[in-house]
Image (cartoon, helix red, strand yellow):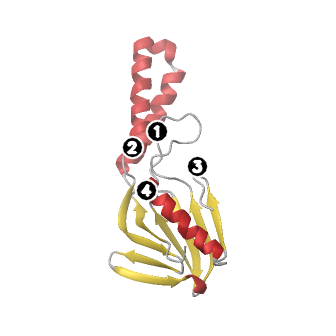
Amino acid sequence: MDNAKVVLPKIVRKKSALLKFFLCSGIILLAASFFEPFQMGKWATMSILLVSVLMLNSYYVIKEYRIIGSVNLLSDRIIVNDNGRLNNYPLLDLSDIEVLLLEVKGEFHRGKAITTVTGSNNFIKFRYQGMVEEIMFLLEEQNSSNLAEVLQSWHQNNITFKLHNQTRKKFI
């Protein structure tokens, strides 16, 4: 466990106007298909409903992030490669460590959704030399077991951290 390591893509969110357009248009069309079903006719209502569902699904299918580096989580440190700039954070020098695992790429949304999550809504936060660092990373299925090993090594080495896990995986 002392050699536990996982390399995760460091990401930032895209602020895509196209994604916002698909989301807003899909919601408006979806609402219109329910409010005006009798005045438009059955085929028109079904067509609008289909288009709105496709627009809302495209919002989830289109990649909403950009990879800008990597996050290396090790048993004793965190190394962040941010476009070639390396930041080395020894765990013993960190405080208020929080790991927020909200999505694993490919998992289905909660409930009976037909779309999957992108895995881009995951963060590690900590305080280093008085400054709060927040790093967003992509979590894919193939990295989840290595991440679990790293988090277990932190736990075994008495590194104090909070884990917020909303995925279907067990990490500790």
**As shown in the figure, which amino acid type bears the numbered disc 1?**
Thr
Residue under label 4, please give it.
142
Residue 39 or 24: which is nearer the viewer? 24
Residue displayed at 60% across by 85% down: 92
**As shown in the figure, which amino acid type bears the numbered disc 3?**
Arg
Looking at the rendered structure, which numbered label has been put on residue 115? 1
Proximity of marks 3 and 1: CB atoms separated by less than 8 Å: no
Residue under label 2, please give it.
61
Residue 45 position in % (x across, y down): 44, 18
Residue 76 position in % (x across, y down): 54, 81
Looking at the rendered structure, which numbered label has been put on residue 168? 3
Quadrant of image for the N terminus: bottom right
Helix, strand or loop status at disc 3: loop
Q: In front: mark 3 or mark 1?
A: 3
- The correct choice, above or below, for 50 with respect to 69 in the image is above
Q: Upstream in the sequence, badge 2 or badge 1?
A: 2
Helix, strand or loop status at disc 2: helix
Residue 48 or 153: which is nearer the viewer? 153
